[in-house]
Image (cartoon, rainbow, N blue to C red):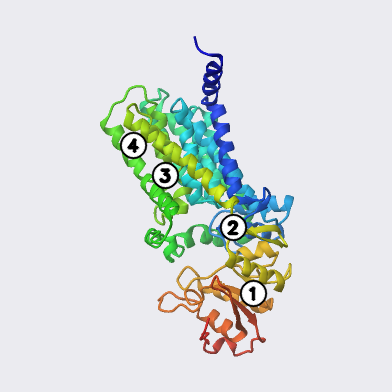
Amino acid sequence: MIAPENRFLKTVLQFVVRPVPASILTALFNFLTCYFRSFVSVKVPVVRWGDQVGFFNDGSRMVLGQLPYRDYFKIVPPGTDLTYALLIDIFGVRMWVPNLLMVSLAALTALLMTLITSRLMRGAIIALPGLLLASFILVASTDATHHWFSTIAILAALLVMMEGITFPRIAAAGALCGVAACYTQSKGAMAVAAFVVYLAVYAKRHDETPSHDRWRKSLLLCGVAAGVFAAVNLYFIQAAGLRMWLYCLIVYPLRYYPSPTINNWRVVIDGFPSHAGLLTWAVFAFVYATVPLVYIVFFSRKLWTKEEGEPWDRLQLVAMTGVAMFLTVASAPSLKRLATVSPPAMILLSWLLNRSGKAVAGLRILLATTAISLAIAVPVHLQTRSPYYLNLPAGRAALVDPSLYVEYLWLLENTHPGEYFFGLPPFYSAFHMLNPAPVVDFHASDYTRPWQVAALIEALQSHQVSMLVLRRTRDFLWATGSPSDHLQPLRIYVSQNYRLTKTFPTGDEVWLRIRMPDSHGLNALPIEPTSH
């Protein structure tokens, strides 16, 4: 006979590995581990320097009545800015908003990943993708940006499609792809393409409906996606003009965005963690080893093996969606970007490991154990440190880097909310300062266009901006040798109207205005600072 306590334990285990309980538990695990990587002392947010800060700032500009493409430059659709604007309108410009938003996105991603996995497998293995997300993936990318928003929308569309390809489900999937495109235009478009290929080619062999119905479904998918995308963007097109909107979302990303190393294939070389610790190496190796290699293994296995009983149609749909998502970042596959498109790869990796045999079972246990340990160890390490606390205009915040603390403390003592300022994006929201320019940064390449330089100078002059906080000026502002450098007028303006007054341990520099520009100021030669 089975002892009562063993019978109870068995019942509990059978319950928690069911799709809904397992999905809730993995979502909760991701929420808690991500939360304690983003907050200390239970509710104090940790200062973040990721791309989410820029979107948070843009959301605050929208609340003030400014619009993307018309008042400030943007290369992605307005979905992320609208989301942040809504949150700011409700809660204000508070330091905890982007942190808690990322925590929520992590939980929602884990929920969808586990539900999708449960349509492919049964048992405890369905929790593995969520565990990999909580560890390797979120350690690599915890920025609440358009990348995660669009990924979640596509995962939701994938889940809908896995339940069947009826007309209502196709319409729902199309709407979700349209939502994804409102955050990341390329990812939404590629997801639509993947679903159309699935409907037109692969589903043809597994669906007995007439061919014209499949094409009608494809048209419905594309039409609904386009309709949702148009509905969200129409107001901004009218405000900025169709030509400017097309330039920002299509022309600039294709022609000028890849100019800096960080936005092209060289990011892999520059991002190589040559002097990093064991954790960074482990995350770097895992992400680059699984995305996109897992798709190669999957398609090779499907080509050469004929396993019976496998849900090949659903597996194919997951793989095609994952490849489509990967292609959107393949030209600039940074660790952060790869992490945000990795959920389908984590699902297929779990399926590939769902095999009999001691070696594969041992590998599953090792991977799951490592993932759990890593997911818990990172927040424990943060919580046991002694951070620096500051009461900023955007609320109480914690800084774990003493150099950043020195910089934030100086700015807290030398700035005031509502002041016009130009420089590093994290300072706008933290100190409630205003950016008068249509751009937030610049680069000595085609990434910064001549009209952007002119607009920046005009903003600095018309608003008499008293302070600039610039990073690595010898690599950016004073950089030379690039044939596509358009920063010369900015160098002239800064050298004649600002003086370098302070350099922080981080390398950031404070430039204070020294005088009004004269009528011949823009024709003078720039004066590069001789010391930093």
Disc 3 versus disc 4: nearer the observer: 4
Disc 4 versus disc 2: nearer the observer: 2
Residue 526 visible, this orientation: yes
Q: Which sits earlier in the primary sequence, circle 4 or circle 2?
A: 2
Q: Which sits earlier in the primary sequence, circle 1 or circle 2?
A: 2
Q: Indicate the position of residue 236 as horizontal and vertical percent values.
A: 62, 56
Task: Say which amino acid is labelled 2.
Answer: Arg
Q: Which sits earlier in the primary sequence, circle 3 or circle 2?
A: 2
Task: Say which amino acid is labelled 4.
Answer: Phe
Residue 258 visible, this orientation: no
Packing grade of label 1 (10 A; few <14, some 14-19, many >=20) is some
Packing grade of label 4 (10 A; few <14, some 14-19, many >=20) is some
Disc 4, SS: helix
Task: Say which amino acid is labelled 3.
Answer: Ala
Q: Nearer the viewer, residue 281 or 63?
A: 281
Per the image, the residue denoted by label 3 is 324
Disc 3, SS: helix
Q: Nearer the viewer, residue 35 or 381?
A: 381
* 345, above or below 480, in the image: above
Q: Indicate the position of residue 143 as horizontal and vertical percent values.
A: 55, 53
Disc 3 versus disc 2: nearer the observer: 2
Per the image, the residue denoted by label 4 is 298
Q: Do the CB atoms of the residues marked 4 and 2 lie less than 8 Å apart? A: no
Residues at marks 3 and 2, CA–CA distance in whole angstroms: 30 Å
Q: Which sits earlier in the primary sequence, circle 3 or circle 1?
A: 3
Disc 1 versus disc 2: nearer the observer: 2
* The furthest residue to the left: 304
